[in-house]
């Protein structure tokens, strides 16, 4: 992988990030009426309104405001919550690991579920296994994550009592407690992704298994297991990589609702809580961080193509 | 879908008839379409056929299990769930159709221009699309609709913004493909204004993929609207919506856990129907769509 | 009337135990309306160290036959309906899948028509050669790597050791076919099945590959089953040849005899349609029509619809393969007809 390629890709991200930052900053201007009045909430004192106006720099020209905000962001200062009066960066750093652990849990569900379903369906094409996976995938894609969450709670927390209905235990506190608290949220969040991956993988595996090089591998006396695990999967996984990039963005979005349902104190719940109070610095900071994360992941997906596809690497 | 095929300029008579022939042979597609037609009828006929007023509270009969009087039971303040589901269907359908329609309305001219002029304007538009796509759909929709203020209209606007990049890329890609094709060269030499040709050709070529994409996106809009309602941002109480009903049933998950299944099944079934319909359309609309 | 001279020497060879012997073999594929027999009553044998050609148009069943020897036709939709395939006396059709895997690539190897797609684009040439070796030989990666370099060298790829690290897209079509041959030779098979190995290549490259195959075959005393639609190529490389038409063998003979004096009108047709060196090409005569659906001509000579010698007796009943010493033909009129060869 030539280093120039990576650098070029990184530079191409800059305009997009610039637009994202302008968009997020511009949220202030989307607020109907006088932003300071709206943000201060009903029955706020004139002093409070003025304080917010000063804090957000709303008196200054938009460009100056943007520059002040952006240079703060570039120095790691995302402002201070209007209500909690805690620096947004501090709070985000505290909540970030929680959301990441949930996202990883969900990603595991997506990948493991997707691979298992996709491979099983492709290898047992036309059988009941295939139909089960395909039907399950269609339903899984159509089911809202928050409904899956509710079903899981009703079945496994309320009726069976296997998992806590809500709450989060950090991994440093108790690894098993963490696993228990993260299982249902991960499944709720990752199920749709697993369905999408299974469906896509089934299709690309079936295509790949008809390729000439698979016939060559068979003619050389390789075992079916080796043919699928090595020859077919590496080629079939290409489209899945793109998909995973998209899925991660979807997962991060889903944390807002899933963290809310399961009472997990992550970035998603932070966004949810501040969206209703219109705690603008928090919303802007958290959304920006999530956007950065999505950009980073898609960049990594891009780079990983090179490892899967030798043509891209050598040219 | 009758209206869709009738107004889309790309579907000529003969394509239309082979389309119907193929579509009518697709059993799951027909079932999905029938379900959606029925749902639409129920949603908009709700004032006529709903057994109760969806807002009428009967505090003597709260959280009742399904019975002859209340086919799907009653909710936490004694409202008839079936009636609320019927009215709630309206919200889901309106949000789906309106957000996709609004998004298309913006994306169509923007995509046409973007693909036609290329150059800096195109770059700006496409970077904008990239930027929108760096934000997870739900986060974006949540933020926009929160900032604009809660309500179905603002939720619809937020969703339209979320869907923009997908439609933009689809349309722009089609314009670029059409530009390359030789018949454009041919018409240019006889002096026909190229933008008109492109617009005409693009609309002709893109009708099929756009219909399919619109159906898929509508399913997604339904999910997203339900999520926004669930979080308290869509339609405001006491108006019924499926997402909102799910979130209130969640409050009684220990005493009336079965209630979560009614709106959930409705949402999943409708999204499933839209996805199945999209697949059936993709298969029935034939060759031109598979190549795009 | 023609007398057929039986060469006793050749007869002795025929009676000797063959390496591969396909007997009354039939393959069917499921279609919308029942089973369609695409290979029917095919019998031939390949002796150790000889090159047997299998010739026919596309749809004649020659590739299906070749793939069936490796048991590589997908079942379903295909099924083996009848016959035996004896390899060193062992019926391959009686083996279970794990046993069959020990034969594939080990005792019988195969190369294919499309070198560009026959190797996995995601792995290096070396990786795929090492894999082919280690599939049947218990050797270390290091040893297998050395052997892989030897093999590449053997098939005439310069700078073999460096090229092991290349991915297939860095190789030309001819080079890839050489690499495929190297992979096929990995475990020193007794039989190499070559399914149209030169069809997709340029004429000059084609000649190089044929030369390479002939050389390797002699060097390792390996038997080869060579599938082709091109009689010219077959004449170049084969000792004996069987001509297939509509799922059946219609004639088999030594290459010399077949070219000298075909016994089946279809063979004659193929010869007339074949361009020859040093002769004007305006005399090429194509065979009219296409290969018919086997079922539609099951009650008569299958070639009858396209044969210029067709008579009533040809339409009366299916024609059996009749042996004349080492030769055989599936033509009821073979004794009356004097067909033209290439001499």
Image (spheres, coloured by chain):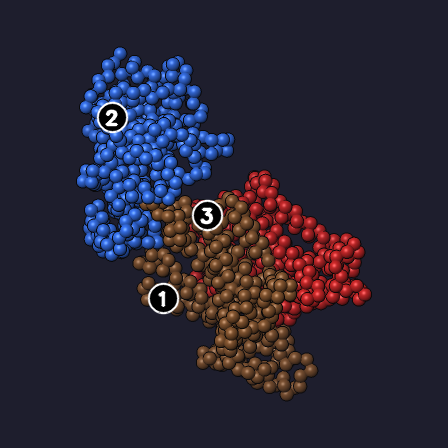
Q: Which label sits in the foreground, 2 or 3?
A: 2
User: Where does the image place residue B99, in percent across and percent down from the top left?
Assistant: 61, 60
Q: Is residue C230 visible?
A: no
- Pointer 3 residue: A123
Q: How many marks?
A: 3
Residue topped by disc 1: A6
Q: Are marks 2 and 1 in contact (CB under 8 Å)?
A: no
Q: Quadrant of residue A295?
A: bottom left
Using the numbered discs, state the Cα–Cα distance from disc 1 to disc 3 in whole angstroms: 37 Å
Q: What colour is chain B?
A: red
- Residue C15, numbered circle: 2
- Foreground residue, C61 or C13? C13
Q: Residue at x 33, y 21 (%)?
A: C321
Does the image show residue A258?
yes
Q: For the residues marked 2 and 1, what is the alpha-carbon distance in whole angstroms?
A: 68 Å
Same subunit: marks 2 and 1: no
Q: Secondary structure at mark 3?
A: helix
Above-or-below relation of C230 to C201: above
Q: Nearer the viewer, residue A151 or A19?
A: A151
* Colour blue belongs to chain: C
The chain ID associated with circle 2 is C
Task: Determine the colour of chain A.
Answer: brown
The spot of residue B243 in percent (x, y) is 65, 63
Q: Are marks 1 and 3 in contact (CB under 8 Å)?
A: no
Q: Nearer the viewer, residue C275 or B194?
A: C275
């Amino acid at each position: 992988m030539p280093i120039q390629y990576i650098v070029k890709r990184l530079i191409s991200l800059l305009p997009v990030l610039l637009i994202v930052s302008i968009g997020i900053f511009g949220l202030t201007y989307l607020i109907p009426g006088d932003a300071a009045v709206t943000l201060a909430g009903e029955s706020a004192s004139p002093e409070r309104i003025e304080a917010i106006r000063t804090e957000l720099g709303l008196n200054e020209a938009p460009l100056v405001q943007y520059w002040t905000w952006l240079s703060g962001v570039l120095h790691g200062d995302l402002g201070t919550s209007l209500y909690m009066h805690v620096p947004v960066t501090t709070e985000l750093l505290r909540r970030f690991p929680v959301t990441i652990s949930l996202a990883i849990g969900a990603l595991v569900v997506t990948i493991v579920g997707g691979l298992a379903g996709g491979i099983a369906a492709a290898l047992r094409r036309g059988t009941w296994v295939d139909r089960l996976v395909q039907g399950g995938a269609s339903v899984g894609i159509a089911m809202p994550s928050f409904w899956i969450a509710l079903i899981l709670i009703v079945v496994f927390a309320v009726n069976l009592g296997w998992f806590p209905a809500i709450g989060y235990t950090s991994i440093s506190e108790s690894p098993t407690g963490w696993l228990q608290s993260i299982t249902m949220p991960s499944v709720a969040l990752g199920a749709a992704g697993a369905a999408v991956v299974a469906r896509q993988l089934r299709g690309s595996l079936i295509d790949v298994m008809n390729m000439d090089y698979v016939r060559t591998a068979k003619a050389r006396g390789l075992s079916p297991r080796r043919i699928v695990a090595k020859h077919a999967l590496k080629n079939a996984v290409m489209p899945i990589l793109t998909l995973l990039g998209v899925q991660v963005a979807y997962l991060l979005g889903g944390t807002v609702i899933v963290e809310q349902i399961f009472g997990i104190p992550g970035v998603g719940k932070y966004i949810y809580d501040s969206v209703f109070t219109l705690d603008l610095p928090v919303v802007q900071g958290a959304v920006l961080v999530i956007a950065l994360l999505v950009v980073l992941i898609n960049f990594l997906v891009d780079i990983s193509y090179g490892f899967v596809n030798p043509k891209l690497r050598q040219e | 879908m009758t209206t869709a095929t009738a107004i889309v300029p790309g579907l000529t008579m003969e394509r239309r008839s082979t389309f119907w022939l193929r579509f009518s042979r697709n059993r799951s597609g027909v079932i999905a379409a029938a379900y959606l037609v029925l749902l639409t009828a129920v949603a908009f006929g709700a004032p006529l056929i709903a057994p109760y007023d969806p807002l009428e509270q009967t505090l003597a009969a709260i959280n009742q299990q399904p019975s002859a009087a209340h086919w799907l039971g009653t909710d936490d303040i004694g409202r008839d769930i079936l009636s609320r589901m019927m009215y709630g269907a309206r919200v889901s359908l309106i949000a789906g159709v309106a957000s996709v329609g609004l998004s298309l309305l913006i994306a169509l001219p923007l995509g046409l221009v973007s693909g036609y002029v290329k150059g800096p304007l195109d770059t700006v538009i496409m970077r904008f699309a990239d930027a929108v796509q760096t934000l997870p759909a739900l986060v974006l929709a949540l933020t926009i609709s929160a900032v604009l203020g809660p309500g179905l209209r603002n939720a619809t606007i937020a969703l339209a913004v979320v869907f923009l990049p997908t439609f933009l890329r689809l349309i722009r890609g089609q314009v670029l493909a059409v530009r390359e094709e030789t018949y454009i060269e041919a018409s240019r030499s006889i002096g026909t204004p190229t933008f008109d040709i492109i617009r005409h050709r693009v609309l002709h070529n893109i009708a099929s993929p756009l219909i399919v994409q619109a159906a898929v996106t509508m399913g997604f809009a339904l999910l997203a609207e339900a999520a926004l309602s669930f979080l308290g941002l869509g339609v405001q109480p006491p108006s019924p919506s499926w997402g909102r009903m799910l979130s209130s049933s969640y409050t009684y998950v220990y005493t009336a856990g079965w209630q979560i299944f009614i709106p959930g099944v409705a949402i999943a079934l409708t999204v499933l129907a839209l996805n199945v319909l999209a697949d059936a359309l993709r298969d029935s609309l034939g060759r031109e769509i598979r190549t795009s | 009337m023609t007398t057929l001279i039986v060469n006793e020497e050749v007869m002795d060879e025929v009676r000797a135990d063959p390496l591969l012997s396909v007997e009354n073999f039939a393959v069917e594929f499921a279609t919308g309306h029942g089973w369609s027999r695409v290979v029917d009553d095919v019998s031939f044998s390949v002796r150790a160290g000889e090159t047997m050609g299998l010739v026919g148009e596309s749809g004649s069943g020659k590739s299906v036959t070749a793939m069936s020897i490796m048991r590589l036709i997908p079942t379903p939709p295909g099924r083996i309906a009848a016959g035996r395939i004896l390899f060193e006396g062992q019926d391959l059709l009686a083996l279970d899948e794990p046993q069959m895997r020990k034969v594939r690539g080990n005792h019988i190897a195969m190369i294919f028509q499309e070198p560009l797609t026959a190797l996995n684009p995601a792995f290096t040439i070396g990786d795929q050669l090492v894999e082919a070796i280690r599939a049947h030989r218990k050797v270390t990666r290091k040893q297998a790597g050395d052997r892989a370099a030897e093999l590449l060298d053997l098939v005439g790829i310069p700078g073999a050791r460096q090229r092991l690290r290349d991915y297939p897209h860095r190789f030309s079509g001819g080079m890839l076919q050489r690499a495929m041959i190297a992979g096929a030779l990995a475990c020193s098979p007794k039989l190499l099945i070559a399914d149209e190995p030169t069809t997709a290549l340029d004429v000059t490259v084609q000649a190089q590959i044929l030369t390479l195959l002939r050389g390797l075959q002699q060097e390792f005393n390996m038997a080869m089953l060579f599938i082709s639609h091109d009689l010219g190529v077959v004449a170049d490389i084969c000792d004996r040849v069987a001509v297939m038409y509509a799922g059946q063998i219609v004639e088999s003979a030594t290459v010399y005899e077949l070219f000298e004096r075909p016994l089946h009108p279809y063979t004659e047709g193929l010869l007339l349609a074949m361009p020859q060196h040093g002769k004007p090409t305006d005399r090429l005569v194509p065979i009219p029509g296409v290969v018919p659906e086997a079922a539609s001509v099951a009650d008569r000579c299958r070639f009858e619809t396209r044969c210029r010698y067709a008579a009533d007796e040809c339409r009366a009943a299916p024609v059996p393969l009749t042996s004349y010493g080492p030769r055989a033909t599936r033509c009821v009129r073979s004794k009356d007809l004097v067909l033209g060869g290439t001499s």
